[in-house]
Image (cartoon, rainbow, N blue to C red):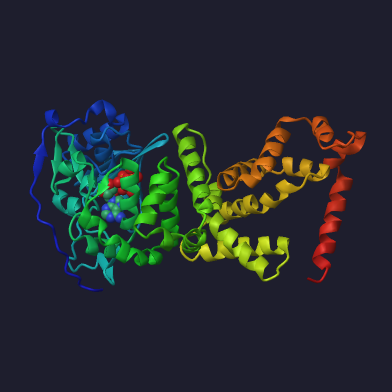
Amino acid sequence: MHGTATITPSTALRTIPRDQHTISRKDISPNALRVLYRLRDAGFQAYLVGGAVRDLLVGGHPKDFDVATDATPEQVRQQFRNCRLIGRRFRLAHVVFGREIIEVATFRANVDDGSGDREMDNGRLVRDNVYGTVEDDAVRRDFTANALYYAIDDFSVRDYVGGFEDTMARRLKLIGDPEQRYREDPVRMLRAVRLAAKLNFEIDADTAAPIAPLAPLLAEAAPARLFEEILKLFLSGHSVASFEGLERFGLLKVLFPETAAALASNRSGALRRMVLAGLAGTDQRVANDEPVSPAFLFALLLWPAYCRALMGLQAQGVHAEEAQRRAADRVTLHQLNTVALPRRFSLPMQEIWLLQTRFGNRQRKRVMRLLSHPRFRAAFDFLVLRLAASPEHAEDVAFWREAQTQSGEELAVALGVAPAADAIIDEDAPPSKRRRRRRRRSTAASPE
Ligand code: ATP
Ligand code: MG
Protein backbone atom coordinates (compact mmCIF):
# COMPACT_ATOMS: atom_id res chain seq x y z
CA MET A 1 0.00 0.00 0.00
CA HIS A 2 1.25 3.41 -0.93
CA GLY A 3 0.64 6.17 1.59
CA THR A 4 -0.30 8.80 -0.93
CA ALA A 5 -0.88 12.21 0.62
CA THR A 6 -4.31 13.43 -0.33
CA ILE A 7 -4.85 17.12 -0.78
CA THR A 8 -8.16 17.69 0.93
CA PRO A 9 -9.94 20.70 -0.48
CA SER A 10 -11.05 23.16 2.17
CA THR A 11 -14.75 23.05 2.74
CA ALA A 12 -17.08 25.74 3.94
CA LEU A 13 -20.74 24.89 4.20
CA ARG A 14 -23.12 27.06 2.27
CA THR A 15 -26.78 26.36 2.88
CA ILE A 16 -29.19 27.36 0.15
CA PRO A 17 -32.62 27.60 1.80
CA ARG A 18 -35.71 26.13 0.13
CA ASP A 19 -36.93 29.46 -1.24
CA GLN A 20 -33.64 30.11 -3.03
CA HIS A 21 -33.50 26.99 -5.20
CA THR A 22 -35.88 25.27 -7.58
CA ILE A 23 -35.98 21.75 -6.17
CA SER A 24 -39.48 20.77 -5.28
CA ARG A 25 -40.60 17.58 -3.58
CA LYS A 26 -43.12 16.94 -6.33
CA ASP A 27 -40.21 16.32 -8.72
CA ILE A 28 -38.62 13.75 -6.44
CA SER A 29 -39.55 10.09 -6.70
CA PRO A 30 -42.07 9.25 -3.93
CA ASN A 31 -40.01 6.18 -3.07
CA ALA A 32 -36.88 8.26 -2.58
CA LEU A 33 -38.88 10.57 -0.31
CA ARG A 34 -40.12 7.56 1.64
CA VAL A 35 -36.52 6.43 2.20
CA LEU A 36 -35.39 9.91 3.23
CA TYR A 37 -38.23 10.36 5.73
CA ARG A 38 -37.81 6.92 7.21
CA LEU A 39 -34.11 7.45 7.84
CA ARG A 40 -34.71 10.89 9.31
CA ASP A 41 -37.45 9.56 11.59
CA ALA A 42 -35.02 6.91 12.81
CA GLY A 43 -32.63 9.68 13.86
CA PHE A 44 -30.19 9.54 10.94
CA GLN A 45 -29.07 12.23 8.55
CA ALA A 46 -30.55 11.71 5.09
CA TYR A 47 -29.94 13.58 1.89
CA LEU A 48 -30.77 13.27 -1.75
CA VAL A 49 -27.41 13.49 -3.47
CA GLY A 50 -25.43 13.40 -6.69
CA GLY A 51 -26.83 13.47 -10.21
CA ALA A 52 -30.45 13.81 -9.09
CA VAL A 53 -29.86 17.08 -7.22
CA ARG A 54 -27.81 18.43 -10.11
CA ASP A 55 -30.41 17.44 -12.70
CA LEU A 56 -33.28 18.90 -10.70
CA LEU A 57 -31.43 22.21 -10.32
CA VAL A 58 -31.08 22.58 -14.08
CA GLY A 59 -34.63 21.49 -14.77
CA GLY A 60 -33.88 17.93 -15.84
CA HIS A 61 -35.64 14.70 -14.95
CA PRO A 62 -33.31 12.43 -12.99
CA LYS A 63 -33.36 8.80 -14.04
CA ASP A 64 -32.44 7.61 -10.57
CA PHE A 65 -32.42 9.00 -7.07
CA ASP A 66 -29.52 8.33 -4.74
CA VAL A 67 -29.55 8.85 -1.00
CA ALA A 68 -26.61 9.52 1.33
CA THR A 69 -26.80 8.97 5.06
CA ASP A 70 -24.73 8.56 8.21
CA ALA A 71 -26.45 5.24 8.89
CA THR A 72 -24.26 2.22 8.15
CA PRO A 73 -25.49 -0.26 5.51
CA GLU A 74 -26.56 -2.63 8.32
CA GLN A 75 -28.49 0.16 10.03
CA VAL A 76 -30.16 1.00 6.73
CA ARG A 77 -31.17 -2.61 6.30
CA GLN A 78 -32.80 -2.63 9.72
CA GLN A 79 -35.07 0.20 8.59
CA PHE A 80 -36.41 -1.48 5.47
CA ARG A 81 -37.80 -4.90 4.80
CA ASN A 82 -37.27 -4.46 1.06
CA CYS A 83 -33.55 -3.83 1.39
CA ARG A 84 -30.50 -5.75 0.22
CA LEU A 85 -26.82 -4.98 0.67
CA ILE A 86 -24.62 -5.13 -2.38
CA GLY A 87 -21.05 -4.49 -3.47
CA ARG A 88 -17.71 -5.44 -2.10
CA ARG A 89 -15.71 -2.40 -3.03
CA PHE A 90 -18.53 -0.06 -2.03
CA ARG A 91 -20.95 -1.57 0.42
CA LEU A 92 -24.31 -0.11 -0.56
CA ALA A 93 -27.91 -0.60 0.44
CA HIS A 94 -30.54 -1.02 -2.25
CA VAL A 95 -34.08 -0.34 -1.17
CA VAL A 96 -36.32 -2.04 -3.70
CA PHE A 97 -39.76 -0.77 -4.70
CA GLY A 98 -40.95 -2.93 -7.57
CA ARG A 99 -38.88 -1.79 -10.53
CA GLU A 100 -37.42 1.23 -8.79
CA ILE A 101 -34.32 0.90 -6.67
CA ILE A 102 -33.24 3.66 -4.31
CA GLU A 103 -29.54 3.40 -3.66
CA VAL A 104 -28.55 4.37 -0.14
CA ALA A 105 -24.84 5.00 0.52
CA THR A 106 -23.19 5.66 3.84
CA PHE A 107 -21.01 8.80 3.88
CA ARG A 108 -17.54 7.80 2.80
CA ALA A 109 -14.20 9.51 3.20
CA ASN A 110 -11.39 9.83 0.70
CA VAL A 111 -8.65 9.60 3.27
CA ASP A 112 -6.01 7.08 4.04
CA ASP A 113 -6.47 6.42 7.74
CA GLY A 114 -3.93 3.61 7.76
CA SER A 115 -6.57 0.95 8.39
CA GLY A 116 -5.98 -0.62 5.02
CA ASP A 117 -9.58 -0.08 4.03
CA ARG A 118 -8.48 2.28 1.35
CA GLU A 119 -5.73 1.19 -0.98
CA MET A 120 -3.77 3.11 -3.53
CA ASP A 121 -2.06 1.49 -6.46
CA ASN A 122 0.20 3.94 -8.28
CA GLY A 123 -2.09 6.78 -7.29
CA ARG A 124 -5.15 4.82 -8.36
CA LEU A 125 -8.05 4.12 -6.08
CA VAL A 126 -8.69 0.40 -5.79
CA ARG A 127 -10.88 0.13 -2.72
CA ASP A 128 -12.39 2.69 -0.41
CA ASN A 129 -14.77 1.80 2.30
CA VAL A 130 -13.93 4.22 5.04
CA TYR A 131 -16.99 5.86 6.51
CA GLY A 132 -16.83 9.58 7.09
CA THR A 133 -18.78 12.74 7.61
CA VAL A 134 -20.96 14.48 5.06
CA GLU A 135 -18.07 16.87 4.31
CA ASP A 136 -15.78 13.91 3.62
CA ASP A 137 -18.43 12.44 1.41
CA ALA A 138 -18.74 15.67 -0.58
CA VAL A 139 -15.05 16.09 -1.36
CA ARG A 140 -14.49 12.52 -2.53
CA ARG A 141 -17.07 12.98 -5.31
CA ASP A 142 -15.92 13.95 -8.78
CA PHE A 143 -17.49 17.24 -9.89
CA THR A 144 -18.73 20.07 -7.72
CA ALA A 145 -22.13 19.84 -9.44
CA ASN A 146 -22.31 16.19 -8.29
CA ALA A 147 -21.62 17.02 -4.64
CA LEU A 148 -24.79 18.80 -3.60
CA TYR A 149 -27.01 17.50 -0.79
CA TYR A 150 -30.73 18.10 -0.59
CA ALA A 151 -31.67 17.84 3.09
CA ILE A 152 -35.01 16.29 3.94
CA ASP A 153 -35.24 18.01 7.34
CA ASP A 154 -35.42 21.60 6.03
CA PHE A 155 -35.50 21.16 2.20
CA SER A 156 -32.32 23.17 1.83
CA VAL A 157 -29.41 22.38 -0.47
CA ARG A 158 -26.08 21.92 1.36
CA ASP A 159 -23.00 22.86 -0.63
CA TYR A 160 -19.45 22.21 0.64
CA VAL A 161 -17.53 22.72 -2.60
CA GLY A 162 -19.09 25.59 -4.53
CA GLY A 163 -21.24 23.25 -6.59
CA PHE A 164 -24.39 25.35 -6.42
CA GLU A 165 -22.78 28.31 -8.14
CA ASP A 166 -21.09 26.07 -10.70
CA THR A 167 -24.34 24.29 -11.49
CA MET A 168 -26.21 27.56 -11.93
CA ALA A 169 -23.41 28.72 -14.28
CA ARG A 170 -23.56 25.32 -16.07
CA ARG A 171 -19.94 24.72 -15.28
CA LEU A 172 -18.34 21.32 -14.74
CA LYS A 173 -15.47 21.51 -12.34
CA LEU A 174 -13.53 18.75 -10.60
CA ILE A 175 -13.22 18.92 -6.83
CA GLY A 176 -9.58 19.24 -5.74
CA ASP A 177 -6.54 18.96 -7.99
CA PRO A 178 -7.75 17.85 -11.44
CA GLU A 179 -4.64 15.95 -12.43
CA GLN A 180 -4.63 13.98 -9.20
CA ARG A 181 -8.33 13.21 -9.54
CA TYR A 182 -7.88 11.88 -13.10
CA ARG A 183 -4.93 9.79 -12.03
CA GLU A 184 -6.95 8.25 -9.19
CA ASP A 185 -9.67 7.30 -11.65
CA PRO A 186 -9.12 7.95 -15.38
CA VAL A 187 -12.79 7.19 -16.13
CA ARG A 188 -13.49 10.65 -14.71
CA MET A 189 -12.21 12.02 -18.02
CA LEU A 190 -15.03 10.25 -19.81
CA ARG A 191 -17.49 11.37 -17.17
CA ALA A 192 -16.44 14.97 -17.77
CA VAL A 193 -17.13 14.70 -21.49
CA ARG A 194 -20.33 12.75 -20.95
CA LEU A 195 -21.83 15.05 -18.35
CA ALA A 196 -20.87 18.17 -20.33
CA ALA A 197 -22.61 16.67 -23.37
CA LYS A 198 -25.64 15.52 -21.44
CA LEU A 199 -26.17 18.70 -19.45
CA ASN A 200 -24.83 21.17 -21.98
CA PHE A 201 -22.27 22.33 -19.40
CA GLU A 202 -18.92 23.92 -20.11
CA ILE A 203 -15.92 22.04 -18.73
CA ASP A 204 -13.98 24.48 -16.56
CA ALA A 205 -10.54 25.38 -17.98
CA ASP A 206 -8.51 23.76 -15.17
CA THR A 207 -10.64 20.63 -15.35
CA ALA A 208 -10.33 20.45 -19.15
CA ALA A 209 -6.59 21.12 -19.44
CA PRO A 210 -5.19 17.78 -18.15
CA ILE A 211 -7.57 15.59 -20.15
CA ALA A 212 -5.69 15.45 -23.47
CA PRO A 213 -2.27 14.82 -21.86
CA LEU A 214 -3.67 12.18 -19.47
CA ALA A 215 -5.96 10.53 -22.03
CA PRO A 216 -3.67 7.48 -22.49
CA LEU A 217 -4.35 6.49 -18.84
CA LEU A 218 -7.83 5.55 -19.91
CA ALA A 219 -6.46 2.54 -21.77
CA GLU A 220 -5.70 0.97 -18.39
CA ALA A 221 -9.22 1.33 -17.03
CA ALA A 222 -11.25 -1.86 -16.61
CA PRO A 223 -12.62 -2.84 -20.05
CA ALA A 224 -16.02 -3.75 -18.59
CA ARG A 225 -16.34 -0.35 -17.00
CA LEU A 226 -15.42 1.36 -20.27
CA PHE A 227 -18.09 -0.62 -22.07
CA GLU A 228 -20.71 0.59 -19.59
CA GLU A 229 -19.47 4.15 -19.86
CA ILE A 230 -19.60 4.01 -23.68
CA LEU A 231 -23.22 2.90 -23.56
CA LYS A 232 -23.99 5.90 -21.36
CA LEU A 233 -22.07 8.23 -23.69
CA PHE A 234 -23.82 7.06 -26.83
CA LEU A 235 -27.21 5.61 -25.91
CA SER A 236 -28.60 8.35 -23.67
CA GLY A 237 -29.71 10.81 -26.33
CA HIS A 238 -26.60 13.01 -26.57
CA SER A 239 -24.28 10.86 -28.64
CA VAL A 240 -23.33 13.52 -31.21
CA ALA A 241 -22.14 15.91 -28.50
CA SER A 242 -20.38 13.02 -26.74
CA PHE A 243 -18.57 12.00 -29.91
CA GLU A 244 -17.42 15.54 -30.62
CA GLY A 245 -16.26 15.93 -27.03
CA LEU A 246 -14.27 12.68 -27.18
CA GLU A 247 -12.61 13.84 -30.39
CA ARG A 248 -11.84 17.28 -29.03
CA PHE A 249 -10.16 15.94 -25.88
CA GLY A 250 -8.17 13.21 -27.57
CA LEU A 251 -10.20 10.44 -25.91
CA LEU A 252 -11.65 8.92 -29.07
CA LYS A 253 -8.25 7.67 -30.17
CA VAL A 254 -7.79 5.91 -26.82
CA LEU A 255 -11.23 4.29 -26.76
CA PHE A 256 -11.40 3.46 -30.48
CA PRO A 257 -7.83 3.65 -31.79
CA GLU A 258 -8.51 1.99 -35.15
CA THR A 259 -11.60 4.03 -35.84
CA ALA A 260 -9.76 7.25 -34.97
CA ALA A 261 -6.93 6.27 -37.34
CA ALA A 262 -9.37 5.41 -40.11
CA LEU A 263 -11.20 8.72 -39.70
CA ALA A 264 -7.92 10.63 -39.76
CA SER A 265 -6.86 9.02 -43.03
CA ASN A 266 -10.25 9.38 -44.73
CA ARG A 267 -9.63 12.68 -46.49
CA SER A 268 -13.10 13.11 -47.96
CA GLY A 269 -14.60 12.97 -44.46
CA ALA A 270 -17.26 10.57 -45.73
CA LEU A 271 -16.76 8.08 -42.89
CA ARG A 272 -17.02 10.74 -40.23
CA ARG A 273 -20.19 12.06 -41.86
CA MET A 274 -21.66 8.60 -41.76
CA VAL A 275 -20.80 8.08 -38.09
CA LEU A 276 -22.31 11.44 -37.17
CA ALA A 277 -25.43 10.73 -39.23
CA GLY A 278 -25.80 7.42 -37.40
CA LEU A 279 -25.35 9.02 -34.01
CA ALA A 280 -27.86 11.76 -34.84
CA GLY A 281 -30.32 9.01 -35.74
CA THR A 282 -29.60 7.27 -32.44
CA ASP A 283 -30.27 10.47 -30.51
CA GLN A 284 -33.51 10.90 -32.42
CA ARG A 285 -34.60 7.39 -31.51
CA VAL A 286 -33.85 7.99 -27.84
CA ALA A 287 -35.82 11.25 -27.99
CA ASN A 288 -38.75 9.30 -29.50
CA ASP A 289 -38.49 6.56 -26.86
CA GLU A 290 -37.62 4.02 -29.53
CA PRO A 291 -35.26 1.15 -28.69
CA VAL A 292 -31.54 1.46 -29.47
CA SER A 293 -29.11 -1.42 -29.63
CA PRO A 294 -25.48 -1.71 -28.54
CA ALA A 295 -24.77 -4.01 -31.52
CA PHE A 296 -25.87 -1.38 -34.01
CA LEU A 297 -24.00 1.32 -32.09
CA PHE A 298 -20.74 -0.61 -32.16
CA ALA A 299 -21.28 -1.55 -35.80
CA LEU A 300 -21.39 2.17 -36.45
CA LEU A 301 -18.50 3.22 -34.21
CA LEU A 302 -16.21 0.50 -35.55
CA TRP A 303 -17.28 0.69 -39.20
CA PRO A 304 -14.40 3.02 -40.17
CA ALA A 305 -11.96 0.56 -38.58
CA TYR A 306 -13.62 -2.34 -40.39
CA CYS A 307 -13.48 -0.56 -43.76
CA ARG A 308 -9.83 0.21 -43.28
CA ALA A 309 -8.95 -3.33 -42.27
CA LEU A 310 -10.92 -4.66 -45.23
CA MET A 311 -9.12 -2.40 -47.69
CA GLY A 312 -5.78 -3.47 -46.29
CA LEU A 313 -6.59 -7.16 -46.70
CA GLN A 314 -7.94 -6.74 -50.19
CA ALA A 315 -4.85 -4.80 -51.17
CA GLN A 316 -2.89 -7.86 -50.08
CA GLY A 317 -4.94 -9.90 -52.51
CA VAL A 318 -7.16 -11.68 -50.00
CA HIS A 319 -10.38 -12.84 -51.65
CA ALA A 320 -13.34 -10.55 -50.90
CA GLU A 321 -15.43 -12.84 -48.71
CA GLU A 322 -12.46 -14.09 -46.74
CA ALA A 323 -11.21 -10.52 -46.31
CA GLN A 324 -14.56 -9.45 -44.88
CA ARG A 325 -14.57 -12.20 -42.32
CA ARG A 326 -11.00 -11.58 -41.32
CA ALA A 327 -11.44 -7.81 -41.11
CA ALA A 328 -14.51 -8.24 -38.89
CA ASP A 329 -12.68 -10.63 -36.58
CA ARG A 330 -9.54 -8.57 -36.42
CA VAL A 331 -11.32 -5.31 -35.60
CA THR A 332 -13.40 -7.02 -32.92
CA LEU A 333 -10.38 -8.68 -31.36
CA HIS A 334 -8.31 -5.50 -31.30
CA GLN A 335 -11.15 -3.49 -29.81
CA LEU A 336 -11.44 -5.99 -26.96
CA ASN A 337 -8.05 -4.77 -25.72
CA THR A 338 -9.69 -1.62 -24.42
CA VAL A 339 -13.43 -2.18 -24.29
CA ALA A 340 -15.16 -5.36 -23.15
CA LEU A 341 -17.74 -5.81 -25.87
CA PRO A 342 -19.76 -8.89 -24.95
CA ARG A 343 -20.24 -11.53 -27.64
CA ARG A 344 -23.99 -11.12 -27.60
CA PHE A 345 -23.31 -7.69 -29.13
CA SER A 346 -20.17 -8.34 -31.18
CA LEU A 347 -21.74 -11.22 -33.12
CA PRO A 348 -24.74 -9.24 -34.38
CA MET A 349 -22.39 -6.30 -34.99
CA GLN A 350 -20.33 -8.46 -37.32
CA GLU A 351 -23.46 -9.75 -39.02
CA ILE A 352 -24.53 -6.19 -39.77
CA TRP A 353 -21.17 -5.62 -41.47
CA LEU A 354 -21.07 -8.89 -43.37
CA LEU A 355 -24.61 -8.48 -44.68
CA GLN A 356 -23.68 -5.20 -46.36
CA THR A 357 -22.21 -6.87 -49.44
CA ARG A 358 -25.36 -8.90 -49.99
CA PHE A 359 -27.48 -5.89 -50.87
CA GLY A 360 -25.99 -5.80 -54.38
CA ASN A 361 -27.31 -9.25 -55.27
CA ARG A 362 -30.65 -9.33 -57.08
CA GLN A 363 -30.95 -13.08 -57.60
CA ARG A 364 -34.45 -14.00 -56.55
CA LYS A 365 -33.43 -16.60 -54.01
CA ARG A 366 -30.78 -14.40 -52.52
CA VAL A 367 -33.25 -11.57 -52.19
CA MET A 368 -35.78 -13.76 -50.40
CA ARG A 369 -33.15 -15.17 -48.12
CA LEU A 370 -31.78 -11.78 -47.14
CA LEU A 371 -35.26 -10.41 -46.49
CA SER A 372 -35.95 -13.18 -44.01
CA HIS A 373 -32.58 -12.87 -42.27
CA PRO A 374 -33.07 -12.01 -38.58
CA ARG A 375 -30.57 -9.16 -38.91
CA PHE A 376 -32.01 -7.81 -42.15
CA ARG A 377 -33.68 -4.78 -40.64
CA ALA A 378 -30.57 -3.64 -38.75
CA ALA A 379 -28.38 -4.26 -41.79
CA PHE A 380 -30.76 -2.30 -44.00
CA ASP A 381 -30.85 0.63 -41.55
CA PHE A 382 -27.08 0.52 -41.67
CA LEU A 383 -27.11 0.64 -45.46
CA VAL A 384 -29.29 3.75 -45.25
CA LEU A 385 -26.60 5.36 -43.08
CA ARG A 386 -23.95 4.51 -45.62
CA LEU A 387 -25.94 6.56 -48.07
CA ALA A 388 -25.06 9.57 -45.91
CA ALA A 389 -21.41 8.94 -46.76
CA SER A 390 -21.76 7.97 -50.37
CA PRO A 391 -24.53 8.43 -52.96
CA GLU A 392 -23.53 5.17 -54.64
CA HIS A 393 -25.83 3.26 -52.30
CA ALA A 394 -28.96 5.11 -53.42
CA GLU A 395 -30.08 2.41 -55.82
CA ASP A 396 -29.68 -0.41 -53.29
CA VAL A 397 -31.51 1.57 -50.63
CA ALA A 398 -34.39 2.23 -53.02
CA PHE A 399 -34.60 -1.42 -54.09
CA TRP A 400 -34.57 -2.88 -50.58
CA ARG A 401 -36.91 -0.28 -49.19
CA GLU A 402 -39.39 -1.29 -51.86
CA ALA A 403 -38.70 -5.00 -51.45
CA GLN A 404 -39.73 -4.92 -47.80
CA THR A 405 -43.18 -3.68 -48.69
CA GLN A 406 -43.81 -6.24 -51.42
CA SER A 407 -45.29 -9.70 -51.31
CA GLY A 408 -43.25 -12.63 -52.61
CA GLU A 409 -45.14 -12.60 -55.90
CA GLU A 410 -44.75 -8.88 -56.46
CA LEU A 411 -41.08 -9.25 -55.78
CA ALA A 412 -40.71 -12.06 -58.25
CA VAL A 413 -42.33 -9.89 -60.91
CA ALA A 414 -40.12 -6.95 -60.00
CA LEU A 415 -37.09 -9.19 -60.32
CA GLY A 416 -38.20 -10.22 -63.77
CA VAL A 417 -38.91 -13.85 -62.91
CA ALA A 418 -42.23 -15.56 -63.44
CA PRO A 419 -43.61 -16.49 -60.00
CA ALA A 420 -43.21 -20.25 -60.26
CA ALA A 421 -45.45 -22.27 -58.00
CA ASP A 422 -42.57 -23.72 -56.02
CA ALA A 423 -40.56 -20.52 -55.94
CA ILE A 424 -41.65 -19.12 -52.59
CA ILE A 425 -42.45 -22.32 -50.78
CA ASP A 426 -39.13 -23.79 -51.84
CA GLU A 427 -37.29 -21.10 -49.90
CA ASP A 428 -37.94 -22.56 -46.44
CA ALA A 429 -38.45 -26.14 -47.44
CA PRO A 430 -35.99 -28.77 -46.19
CA PRO A 431 -34.62 -29.74 -49.65
CA SER A 432 -33.32 -26.23 -50.25
CA LYS A 433 -31.76 -26.16 -46.80
CA ARG A 434 -30.03 -29.41 -47.48
CA ARG A 435 -28.68 -28.04 -50.72
CA ARG A 436 -27.39 -24.97 -48.98
CA ARG A 437 -25.60 -26.93 -46.34
CA ARG A 438 -23.99 -29.20 -48.85
CA ARG A 439 -22.72 -26.19 -50.77
CA ARG A 440 -21.17 -24.69 -47.72
CA ARG A 441 -19.42 -27.89 -46.76
CA SER A 442 -17.86 -28.18 -50.17
CA THR A 443 -16.52 -24.61 -49.96
CA ALA A 444 -14.94 -25.29 -46.60
CA ALA A 445 -13.27 -28.39 -47.95
CA SER A 446 -11.70 -26.65 -50.93
CA PRO A 447 -8.14 -25.48 -50.46
CA GLU A 448 -7.72 -21.66 -50.22
P1 ATP B 1 -26.03 10.18 -14.39
O1 ATP B 1 -27.03 11.25 -14.57
O2 ATP B 1 -25.44 9.78 -15.67
O3 ATP B 1 -26.49 9.04 -13.54
P2 ATP B 1 -24.45 10.75 -12.09
O4 ATP B 1 -23.62 11.93 -11.72
O5 ATP B 1 -25.65 10.48 -11.27
O6 ATP B 1 -24.83 10.91 -13.61
P3 ATP B 1 -23.58 8.13 -11.32
O7 ATP B 1 -22.63 7.24 -12.01
O8 ATP B 1 -24.98 7.73 -11.14
O9 ATP B 1 -23.51 9.51 -12.14
O10 ATP B 1 -22.90 8.51 -9.92
C1 ATP B 1 -23.62 9.07 -8.84
C2 ATP B 1 -22.72 10.02 -8.06
O11 ATP B 1 -21.58 9.33 -7.54
C3 ATP B 1 -22.14 11.16 -8.88
O12 ATP B 1 -23.04 12.25 -8.97
C4 ATP B 1 -20.88 11.51 -8.11
O13 ATP B 1 -21.19 12.31 -7.00
C5 ATP B 1 -20.41 10.16 -7.59
N1 ATP B 1 -19.45 9.54 -8.53
C6 ATP B 1 -19.74 8.71 -9.56
N2 ATP B 1 -18.64 8.30 -10.19
C7 ATP B 1 -17.60 8.87 -9.56
C8 ATP B 1 -16.19 8.83 -9.72
N3 ATP B 1 -15.64 8.13 -10.72
N4 ATP B 1 -15.43 9.54 -8.86
C9 ATP B 1 -15.99 10.25 -7.86
N5 ATP B 1 -17.30 10.33 -7.66
C10 ATP B 1 -18.12 9.66 -8.48
MG1 MG C 1 -26.94 8.71 -11.37
Q: Do we see residue 74 in this rendering?
A: no
Residue 218 in the image: above or below residue 287: below
In screen coordinates, is 234 left or right of 39? right
174 relative to 116, above or below: above
| Residue at figure coordinates x 67%, y 61% from the top left | 325
Horizontal and vertical percent position of residue 39: 22, 38
Q: Is residue 52 above or below residue 221?
A: above
Q: Which residue shows up at 26% across the image and 56% down it? A: 208
Give percent across and percent down for residue 62. Answer: 32, 36
For residue 328, above or below residue 389: below
Toward the right, the furthest residue is 421
- In terms of depth relative to the viewer, which is nearer, 420 or 83? 420
Horizontal and vertical percent position of residue 246:
38, 54
392 displayed left or right of 422? left
Direction top: furthest residue? 26
Q: Quadrant of the N terminus?
A: bottom left
The answer to whether any part of residue 403 appears in the image is yes
Q: Nearer the viewer, residue 136 or 52?
A: 52
* Residue at screen point 16% across, 69% down: 5
Residue at figure coordinates x 25%, y 35% from the top left: 58
